[in-house]
């Protein structure tokens, strides 16, 4: 399969990239982002684009993909709803609306978050914006759209978060996350599990569109055909 990856330099995106490059059935991973990953691999191609709102300008390079893993996101801390909506809803939909007509057989996987509000009208700003984003994505003519709602994610294999507050949390809790994952395997995920689950969603689909942490964990465990 050929995979398009947005947000490859973020914590989740780094994990997804690692799993894609290690998968024998992935022929090409093309990243699109504001910065290169710095990695070298024969199956990796990178596009650096300063303004992702204008990805239509590189439409010819966005064709022929079986999947898009959209791992791009920002923290809502300190942002007004209008600013967060622009960087979450507006940006995601700008990319997705460009990709859908170019790749009618594409599976689109969006990394949302635990607690996302599907009504789009809840009290938590980030949750309702994420909910509106999820709802809009499901209206687009992709082969399938899967909405991943992870909670706590343990970064593995040297991966670090670019968000200082998140990295502080992971640094502080690192000694606890591994044993906690063993105790609560369906509640605490890892970057590796996220990548494996996304690939399996493309390989054979998932039982439902919205996947919470337990669903993601079960999907990651399924063995490729």
Image: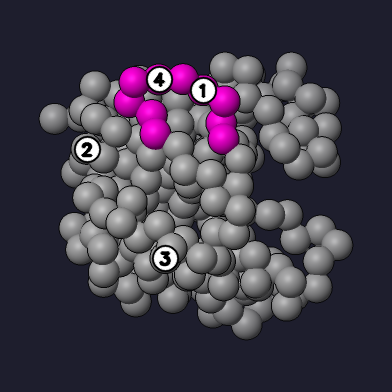
Q: Which of 73/212 is in front?
A: 73
Which quadrant would the N terminus be assigned to in this image?
Answer: top left
**N-term-proximal mark, 2 vs 4:** 2
> Start and end of the magenta stretch?
36-45
Instruction: Name the residue that disc number 2 marks.
Output: 1
User: What secondary structure characterizes most of the magenta part?
Assistant: loop
In this view, the mark in front (3 or 1): 3
Task: Assess disc 1: are there few (<14), some (14-19) or many (≥20) residues with their C-alpha within 10 Å of its C-alpha.
Answer: few
The residue pinned by badge 3 equals 56
Crowding near the residue tagged with mark 2, few <14, some 14–19, many ≥20 C-alpha atoms within 10 Å:
some
On the image, numbered disc 4 is attached to which residue?
41
Q: What residue occupies the far left of the structure in this picture?
A: 225
Q: Is residue 199 above or below residue 18?
A: below
Q: Mark 3 packing: few (<14 Cα in 10 Å), some, or many (20+)?
A: some
Question: Farthest bottom residue?
Answer: 121
Q: Are marks 3 and 2 in contact (CB under 8 Å)?
A: no
Q: Is residue 127 left or right of residue 46?
A: right
Image quadrant in which you'd find residue 143: bottom left
Residue at 82% across, 41% down: 165
């Amino acid at each position: 399969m050929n995979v398009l990856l947005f947000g490859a330099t973020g914590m989740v995106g780094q994990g997804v990239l690692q799993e894609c490059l290690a998968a024998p059935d992935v022929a090409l991973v093309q990243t699109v982002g504001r910065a290169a990953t710095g990695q070298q691999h024969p199956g990796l191609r990178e596009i650096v684009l300063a303004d992702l709102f204008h990805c239509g300008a590189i439409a010819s390079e966005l064709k022929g993909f079986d999947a898009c893993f959209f791992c791009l996101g920002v923290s809502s801390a300190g942002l007004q709803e209008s600013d967060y909506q622009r960087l979450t809803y507006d940006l995601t939909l700008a990319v997705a609306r460009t990709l859908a007509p170019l790749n009618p057989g594409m599976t689109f996987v969006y990394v949302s978050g635990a607690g996302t509000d599907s009504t789009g009208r809840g009290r938590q700003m980030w949750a309702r914006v994420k909910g509106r984003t999820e709802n809009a994505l499901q209206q687009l003519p992709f082969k399938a759209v899967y909405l991943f709602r992870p909670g706590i994610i343990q970064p593995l294999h040297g991966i670090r978060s670019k968000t200082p507050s998140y990295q502080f949390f992971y640094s502080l809790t690192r000694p606890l996350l591994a044993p906690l994952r063993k105790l609560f395997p369906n509640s605490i995920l890892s970057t590796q599990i996220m990548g494996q689950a996304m690939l399996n969603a493309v390989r054979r689909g998932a039982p439902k569109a919205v996947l919470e942490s337990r669903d993601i964990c079960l999907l990651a465990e399924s063995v490729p055909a």
